[in-house]
Amino acid sequence: MSFDPQALGRLGITEEQIELMDVAENFCRETSDIAAVRGLIDGAAGFDPAVWDKIAALGWLGIAIPEGYGGVGLSLAEVVPVAEQMGRRMMALPFSPTTLCAQALLAAGTETQKETYLPKIAEGMIATLALSELNTAFDLSEIETTAVRTQDGFSMTGRKVLVQNLDTAKLLVLSAKLDGQICLFAVETDLMAAPQMRREIIIDETKRTYELTLDGLAVPESARMDAEKTTAALQRIDLAANLLSSAELVGGAQSCIDYTVDYLKTRKQFGKLIGSYQALKHTIVDAYVGYEKARSLLYAAAHSFEEQGKGEVATRMAAVGAGRALSFAADRAIQFHGGFGFTYDCDAQLYRRRAIFHDSLYGNTRWHKKRLASLLFK
Protein backbone atom coordinates (compact mmCIF):
# COMPACT_ATOMS: atom_id res chain seq x y z
CA MET A 1 0.00 0.00 0.00
CA SER A 2 1.42 3.39 -0.97
CA PHE A 3 0.63 6.70 0.67
CA ASP A 4 0.83 10.30 -0.41
CA PRO A 5 2.82 11.90 2.45
CA GLN A 6 1.14 15.25 1.92
CA ALA A 7 -2.34 13.76 1.97
CA LEU A 8 -1.50 11.68 5.05
CA GLY A 9 -0.96 14.74 7.21
CA ARG A 10 -3.96 16.66 5.93
CA LEU A 11 -5.84 18.58 8.61
CA GLY A 12 -9.50 19.39 8.50
CA ILE A 13 -11.62 20.94 11.22
CA THR A 14 -15.41 20.91 10.89
CA GLU A 15 -17.79 23.51 12.26
CA GLU A 16 -19.31 20.81 14.46
CA GLN A 17 -15.91 20.07 15.99
CA ILE A 18 -15.37 23.75 16.81
CA GLU A 19 -18.81 24.11 18.38
CA LEU A 20 -18.44 20.93 20.42
CA MET A 21 -14.98 21.98 21.57
CA ASP A 22 -16.28 25.31 22.87
CA VAL A 23 -19.16 23.70 24.74
CA ALA A 24 -17.00 20.87 26.10
CA GLU A 25 -14.25 23.23 27.24
CA ASN A 26 -16.68 25.32 29.30
CA PHE A 27 -18.60 22.35 30.66
CA CYS A 28 -15.54 20.35 31.70
CA ARG A 29 -13.89 23.37 33.30
CA GLU A 30 -16.98 24.08 35.40
CA THR A 31 -17.66 20.49 36.47
CA SER A 32 -14.21 18.95 36.91
CA ASP A 33 -11.57 20.96 38.71
CA ILE A 34 -8.67 19.11 40.26
CA ALA A 35 -10.32 19.08 43.69
CA ALA A 36 -13.33 17.28 42.21
CA VAL A 37 -11.03 14.79 40.47
CA ARG A 38 -9.25 13.96 43.72
CA GLY A 39 -12.53 13.80 45.60
CA LEU A 40 -13.85 11.07 43.32
CA ILE A 41 -10.83 8.79 43.79
CA ASP A 42 -12.23 7.29 46.98
CA GLY A 43 -15.77 7.01 45.62
CA ALA A 44 -17.32 3.70 44.66
CA ALA A 45 -18.04 4.55 41.03
CA GLY A 46 -15.12 6.90 40.44
CA PHE A 47 -17.32 9.44 38.68
CA ASP A 48 -20.23 11.76 39.43
CA PRO A 49 -23.54 10.28 38.14
CA ALA A 50 -25.04 13.78 38.00
CA VAL A 51 -22.31 14.90 35.58
CA TRP A 52 -22.90 11.77 33.52
CA ASP A 53 -26.60 12.61 33.26
CA LYS A 54 -25.68 16.10 32.09
CA ILE A 55 -23.44 14.91 29.26
CA ALA A 56 -26.18 12.52 28.18
CA ALA A 57 -28.59 15.46 28.10
CA LEU A 58 -26.08 17.38 25.99
CA GLY A 59 -26.20 14.56 23.44
CA TRP A 60 -22.51 13.70 23.63
CA LEU A 61 -23.11 9.94 23.91
CA GLY A 62 -25.00 10.00 20.62
CA ILE A 63 -22.55 12.11 18.62
CA ALA A 64 -21.31 9.18 16.51
CA ILE A 65 -24.60 7.25 16.52
CA PRO A 66 -26.82 7.60 13.42
CA GLU A 67 -30.04 9.56 13.77
CA GLY A 68 -32.03 6.44 12.91
CA TYR A 69 -30.88 4.92 16.22
CA GLY A 70 -31.51 8.01 18.32
CA GLY A 71 -28.12 9.65 17.87
CA VAL A 72 -26.84 12.94 16.45
CA GLY A 73 -25.59 11.41 13.23
CA LEU A 74 -22.04 12.77 13.19
CA SER A 75 -18.76 10.79 13.28
CA LEU A 76 -15.94 9.92 15.63
CA ALA A 77 -14.10 13.00 14.37
CA GLU A 78 -16.67 15.07 16.26
CA VAL A 79 -16.19 12.97 19.40
CA VAL A 80 -12.48 13.85 19.50
CA PRO A 81 -12.77 17.45 20.81
CA VAL A 82 -15.10 16.27 23.58
CA ALA A 83 -12.69 13.51 24.65
CA GLU A 84 -9.81 15.99 24.46
CA GLN A 85 -11.47 18.42 26.85
CA MET A 86 -12.39 15.60 29.23
CA GLY A 87 -8.74 14.56 29.26
CA ARG A 88 -7.71 18.15 29.87
CA ARG A 89 -9.79 18.21 33.05
CA MET A 90 -8.83 14.65 34.09
CA MET A 91 -12.46 13.52 33.98
CA ALA A 92 -12.91 9.79 34.53
CA LEU A 93 -16.41 9.30 33.16
CA PRO A 94 -17.21 6.05 31.29
CA PHE A 95 -17.47 8.12 28.10
CA SER A 96 -14.89 6.32 25.97
CA PRO A 97 -15.92 2.72 26.80
CA THR A 98 -19.58 3.59 26.20
CA THR A 99 -18.77 5.27 22.89
CA LEU A 100 -16.61 2.32 21.85
CA CYS A 101 -19.37 -0.14 22.72
CA ALA A 102 -21.72 1.81 20.44
CA GLN A 103 -19.13 1.62 17.65
CA ALA A 104 -18.87 -2.13 18.16
CA LEU A 105 -22.64 -2.47 17.78
CA LEU A 106 -22.62 -0.32 14.65
CA ALA A 107 -19.82 -2.40 13.17
CA ALA A 108 -21.08 -5.92 13.96
CA GLY A 109 -24.39 -5.77 15.78
CA THR A 110 -27.54 -7.34 14.39
CA GLU A 111 -30.33 -4.98 13.44
CA THR A 112 -32.26 -6.03 16.54
CA GLN A 113 -29.26 -5.30 18.76
CA LYS A 114 -28.76 -1.89 17.18
CA GLU A 115 -32.41 -0.95 17.57
CA THR A 116 -32.45 -2.19 21.15
CA TYR A 117 -29.23 -0.80 22.58
CA LEU A 118 -28.05 2.21 20.55
CA PRO A 119 -30.97 4.49 21.52
CA LYS A 120 -30.40 3.56 25.17
CA ILE A 121 -26.70 4.39 24.90
CA ALA A 122 -27.53 7.74 23.29
CA GLU A 123 -29.84 8.45 26.23
CA GLY A 124 -27.17 7.66 28.83
CA MET A 125 -26.94 3.91 29.38
CA ILE A 126 -23.39 2.98 30.38
CA ALA A 127 -21.75 0.26 28.28
CA THR A 128 -18.27 -1.19 28.10
CA LEU A 129 -15.98 -3.71 26.36
CA ALA A 130 -14.44 -6.96 27.58
CA LEU A 131 -11.88 -7.76 24.89
CA SER A 132 -8.50 -7.77 26.63
CA GLU A 133 -6.87 -10.80 28.22
CA LEU A 134 -3.59 -11.34 30.02
CA ASN A 135 -1.96 -12.77 26.90
CA THR A 136 -3.35 -10.42 24.25
CA ALA A 137 -0.29 -8.17 23.85
CA PHE A 138 -2.69 -5.52 22.47
CA ASP A 139 -3.88 -7.81 19.67
CA LEU A 140 -7.63 -8.18 20.20
CA SER A 141 -7.70 -11.34 18.10
CA GLU A 142 -5.37 -13.23 20.45
CA ILE A 143 -7.85 -14.58 22.99
CA GLU A 144 -8.41 -17.80 24.91
CA THR A 145 -11.97 -17.22 26.08
CA THR A 146 -14.30 -19.81 24.56
CA ALA A 147 -18.02 -20.12 23.98
CA VAL A 148 -19.73 -23.51 23.75
CA ARG A 149 -23.20 -24.00 22.30
CA THR A 150 -25.93 -25.04 24.70
CA GLN A 151 -29.61 -25.73 24.24
CA ASP A 152 -30.54 -22.12 25.03
CA GLY A 153 -27.49 -20.26 23.72
CA PHE A 154 -23.84 -20.33 24.81
CA SER A 155 -21.76 -21.09 27.88
CA MET A 156 -18.59 -19.04 28.38
CA THR A 157 -15.21 -19.99 29.81
CA GLY A 158 -12.35 -17.56 30.27
CA ARG A 159 -11.20 -14.38 31.91
CA LYS A 160 -11.10 -10.76 30.76
CA VAL A 161 -9.04 -7.92 32.24
CA LEU A 162 -9.08 -4.12 32.17
CA VAL A 163 -12.86 -4.00 31.73
CA GLN A 164 -13.65 -0.36 32.41
CA ASN A 165 -16.59 0.70 34.58
CA LEU A 166 -18.03 -2.80 34.67
CA ASP A 167 -19.75 -2.14 38.00
CA THR A 168 -22.01 0.54 36.51
CA ALA A 169 -22.32 -0.78 32.92
CA LYS A 170 -25.62 -2.19 31.74
CA LEU A 171 -24.26 -3.66 28.51
CA LEU A 172 -21.05 -5.51 27.78
CA VAL A 173 -19.54 -6.44 24.41
CA LEU A 174 -17.19 -9.38 24.89
CA SER A 175 -15.16 -11.60 22.59
CA ALA A 176 -14.87 -15.40 22.64
CA LYS A 177 -13.92 -18.23 20.31
CA LEU A 178 -16.82 -20.27 19.04
CA ASP A 179 -15.84 -23.40 17.11
CA GLY A 180 -12.38 -21.89 16.69
CA GLN A 181 -13.63 -18.59 15.26
CA ILE A 182 -13.72 -15.29 17.16
CA CYS A 183 -17.22 -13.99 17.83
CA LEU A 184 -18.58 -10.95 19.62
CA PHE A 185 -21.48 -11.03 22.06
CA ALA A 186 -23.61 -8.16 23.39
CA VAL A 187 -24.43 -9.22 26.95
CA GLU A 188 -26.61 -7.42 29.44
CA THR A 189 -24.71 -7.28 32.71
CA ASP A 190 -27.77 -8.28 34.72
CA LEU A 191 -26.91 -11.82 33.64
CA MET A 192 -23.62 -11.71 35.53
CA ALA A 193 -23.33 -12.36 39.24
CA ALA A 194 -21.30 -9.96 41.38
CA PRO A 195 -18.67 -12.56 42.43
CA GLN A 196 -17.58 -12.83 38.76
CA MET A 197 -16.18 -9.29 38.94
CA ARG A 198 -13.06 -8.23 40.80
CA ARG A 199 -11.87 -4.66 40.89
CA GLU A 200 -8.29 -4.35 39.72
CA ILE A 201 -5.60 -2.26 41.37
CA ILE A 202 -4.27 -0.02 38.59
CA ILE A 203 -1.80 2.86 38.37
CA ASP A 204 -4.45 5.49 37.56
CA GLU A 205 -6.63 5.76 40.65
CA THR A 206 -9.13 8.00 38.86
CA LYS A 207 -10.13 5.07 36.65
CA ARG A 208 -12.06 1.89 37.44
CA THR A 209 -11.25 -1.42 35.79
CA TYR A 210 -12.31 -4.97 36.60
CA GLU A 211 -11.24 -8.53 36.02
CA LEU A 212 -14.19 -10.55 34.74
CA THR A 213 -14.37 -14.31 35.15
CA LEU A 214 -16.70 -15.79 32.55
CA ASP A 215 -16.65 -19.45 33.61
CA GLY A 216 -20.18 -20.81 33.46
CA LEU A 217 -21.73 -17.58 32.21
CA ALA A 218 -24.85 -18.40 30.18
CA VAL A 219 -25.44 -16.14 27.20
CA PRO A 220 -28.60 -16.28 25.09
CA GLU A 221 -28.52 -16.86 21.35
CA SER A 222 -29.77 -13.32 20.80
CA ALA A 223 -26.54 -11.93 22.27
CA ARG A 224 -24.40 -13.18 19.40
CA MET A 225 -23.34 -10.45 17.00
CA ASP A 226 -22.79 -10.80 13.26
CA ALA A 227 -19.96 -13.34 12.92
CA GLU A 228 -19.07 -12.29 9.39
CA LYS A 229 -18.29 -8.76 10.57
CA THR A 230 -16.21 -9.67 13.63
CA THR A 231 -12.76 -9.08 12.11
CA ALA A 232 -13.70 -5.69 10.70
CA ALA A 233 -15.40 -4.75 13.98
CA LEU A 234 -12.31 -5.58 16.07
CA GLN A 235 -10.16 -3.50 13.74
CA ARG A 236 -12.52 -0.57 14.05
CA ILE A 237 -12.70 -0.87 17.84
CA ASP A 238 -8.91 -0.93 18.04
CA LEU A 239 -8.53 2.23 15.96
CA ALA A 240 -11.45 4.04 17.57
CA ALA A 241 -10.08 3.25 21.03
CA ASN A 242 -6.67 4.62 20.12
CA LEU A 243 -8.19 7.74 18.57
CA LEU A 244 -10.16 8.56 21.72
CA SER A 245 -7.23 7.60 23.93
CA SER A 246 -4.99 9.98 21.96
CA ALA A 247 -7.53 12.76 22.42
CA GLU A 248 -7.58 12.21 26.18
CA LEU A 249 -3.77 12.17 26.38
CA VAL A 250 -3.42 15.33 24.30
CA GLY A 251 -5.87 17.13 26.56
CA GLY A 252 -3.95 15.90 29.58
CA ALA A 253 -0.66 17.14 28.11
CA GLN A 254 -2.08 20.64 27.69
CA SER A 255 -3.32 20.71 31.27
CA CYS A 256 -0.06 19.32 32.64
CA ILE A 257 1.96 21.98 30.83
CA ASP A 258 -0.34 24.75 32.09
CA TYR A 259 -0.01 23.39 35.62
CA THR A 260 3.79 23.32 35.37
CA VAL A 261 4.09 26.80 33.85
CA ASP A 262 1.99 28.23 36.69
CA TYR A 263 4.45 26.71 39.15
CA LEU A 264 7.49 28.02 37.25
CA LYS A 265 5.99 31.51 37.40
CA THR A 266 5.44 31.48 41.17
CA ARG A 267 8.17 29.32 42.75
CA LYS A 268 11.37 31.15 43.71
CA GLN A 269 14.81 29.70 44.31
CA PHE A 270 17.94 31.70 45.16
CA GLY A 271 15.83 34.85 44.95
CA LYS A 272 14.67 34.24 41.36
CA LEU A 273 11.62 32.66 39.78
CA ILE A 274 12.67 29.17 38.71
CA GLY A 275 10.97 29.76 35.37
CA SER A 276 13.70 32.27 34.55
CA TYR A 277 16.38 29.56 34.40
CA GLN A 278 17.17 28.46 30.85
CA ALA A 279 17.33 24.76 31.68
CA LEU A 280 13.71 24.88 32.76
CA LYS A 281 12.51 27.32 30.08
CA HIS A 282 13.94 25.26 27.23
CA THR A 283 12.52 22.02 28.60
CA ILE A 284 9.01 23.34 29.05
CA VAL A 285 9.16 24.70 25.49
CA ASP A 286 10.14 21.21 24.34
CA ALA A 287 7.10 19.84 26.17
CA TYR A 288 4.85 22.41 24.51
CA VAL A 289 6.25 21.65 21.05
CA GLY A 290 5.62 17.97 21.69
CA TYR A 291 2.05 18.77 22.69
CA GLU A 292 1.43 20.86 19.55
CA LYS A 293 2.81 18.08 17.35
CA ALA A 294 0.62 15.53 19.09
CA ARG A 295 -2.48 17.70 18.72
CA SER A 296 -1.83 18.17 15.01
CA LEU A 297 -1.45 14.42 14.59
CA LEU A 298 -4.67 13.91 16.56
CA TYR A 299 -6.81 16.11 14.35
CA ALA A 300 -5.16 14.76 11.21
CA ALA A 301 -6.17 11.29 12.42
CA ALA A 302 -9.70 12.45 13.18
CA HIS A 303 -9.96 13.97 9.69
CA SER A 304 -8.83 10.82 7.88
CA PHE A 305 -10.19 8.21 10.31
CA GLU A 306 -12.74 6.73 7.91
CA GLU A 307 -10.28 6.47 4.99
CA GLN A 308 -9.06 2.95 4.31
CA GLY A 309 -5.39 2.47 5.16
CA LYS A 310 -4.65 6.14 5.66
CA GLY A 311 -6.88 6.29 8.71
CA GLU A 312 -4.98 3.52 10.48
CA VAL A 313 -1.58 5.08 9.77
CA ALA A 314 -2.73 8.50 10.97
CA THR A 315 -4.36 7.06 14.10
CA ARG A 316 -1.30 5.08 15.14
CA MET A 317 0.91 8.12 14.54
CA ALA A 318 -1.43 10.13 16.77
CA ALA A 319 -1.23 7.45 19.47
CA VAL A 320 2.58 7.58 19.45
CA GLY A 321 2.64 11.37 19.56
CA ALA A 322 0.03 11.68 22.31
CA GLY A 323 1.65 9.09 24.57
CA ARG A 324 5.03 10.75 24.23
CA ALA A 325 3.64 14.25 24.79
CA LEU A 326 1.91 13.52 28.09
CA SER A 327 4.67 11.24 29.39
CA PHE A 328 7.36 13.86 28.76
CA ALA A 329 5.29 16.75 30.13
CA ALA A 330 4.39 14.79 33.28
CA ASP A 331 7.96 13.60 33.85
CA ARG A 332 9.24 17.17 33.63
CA ALA A 333 6.43 18.42 35.86
CA ILE A 334 7.47 15.95 38.56
CA GLN A 335 11.12 16.94 38.17
CA PHE A 336 10.45 20.69 38.24
CA HIS A 337 8.40 20.43 41.42
CA GLY A 338 11.46 19.06 43.20
CA GLY A 339 10.90 16.93 46.29
CA PHE A 340 7.22 17.90 46.35
CA GLY A 341 6.87 16.51 42.83
CA PHE A 342 7.43 12.98 44.11
CA THR A 343 4.64 13.19 46.66
CA TYR A 344 1.02 12.11 46.31
CA ASP A 345 -0.15 15.66 47.00
CA CYS A 346 1.49 16.97 43.82
CA ASP A 347 -0.93 16.87 40.90
CA ALA A 348 1.89 16.05 38.48
CA GLN A 349 1.68 12.39 39.50
CA LEU A 350 -1.95 12.25 38.35
CA TYR A 351 -0.89 13.06 34.79
CA ARG A 352 1.98 10.55 34.82
CA ARG A 353 -0.34 7.85 36.09
CA ARG A 354 -2.84 8.63 33.35
CA ALA A 355 -0.14 8.23 30.67
CA ILE A 356 1.03 4.90 32.10
CA PHE A 357 -2.53 3.60 32.31
CA HIS A 358 -3.26 4.35 28.66
CA ASP A 359 -0.06 2.54 27.68
CA SER A 360 -1.63 -0.66 29.05
CA LEU A 361 -4.95 -0.41 27.22
CA TYR A 362 -4.83 -0.56 23.43
CA GLY A 363 -1.16 -0.31 22.59
CA ASN A 364 1.96 1.45 23.82
CA THR A 365 4.41 3.46 21.72
CA ARG A 366 6.50 0.42 20.81
CA TRP A 367 3.43 -1.51 19.66
CA HIS A 368 2.19 1.29 17.43
CA LYS A 369 5.64 1.87 15.92
CA LYS A 370 5.80 -1.80 15.02
CA ARG A 371 2.41 -1.63 13.35
CA LEU A 372 3.36 1.54 11.53
CA ALA A 373 6.50 -0.11 10.19
CA SER A 374 4.44 -2.96 8.75
CA LEU A 375 2.04 -0.49 7.14
CA LEU A 376 4.56 1.96 5.72
CA PHE A 377 7.44 -0.31 4.77
CA LYS A 378 5.85 -3.41 3.31
Image: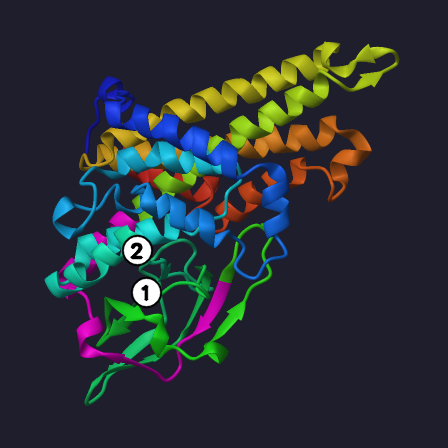
Q: Amino acid at mark 1?
A: Leu
Q: Residue furthest right?
A: 270
- Is 35 located above or below residue 182 in the figure? above
Q: Residue at x 20, y 71 (%)?
A: 224
Q: Looking at the picture, how far across and down is residue 319, in whole percent? A: 41, 36
Q: Residue at x 73, y 26 (%)?
A: 336
Q: Which residues are magenta?
A: 210-237
- For this view, does 288 lie left or right of residue 60? right
Dot 2 alpha-carbon crowd within 10 angstroms: few under 14, some 14 to 19, many 20 or more: many
**In the drawing, what numbered circle is on residue 101?**
2
Could you say which is closer to the camera, residue 212 or residue 141?
A: 212
- Is 307 located above or below residue 282 in the figure? below
Q: Looking at the picture, how far across and down is residue 183, in whole percent? A: 23, 67
Dot 1 alpha-carbon crowd within 10 angstroms: few under 14, some 14 to 19, many 20 or more: many
- Quadrant of the snapshot with the C terminus: top left
Q: Looking at the picture, how far across and down is residue 329, in whole percent? A: 59, 28
Name the residue that disc number 1 marks.
171
Q: Secondary structure at mark 1?
A: strand
**In the drawing, what numbered circle is on residue 231?**
none
Q: Nearer the viewer, mark 2 or mark 1?
A: 1
- Quadrant of the snapshot with the N terminus: top left
Residue 366 sits inside the magenta stretch: no
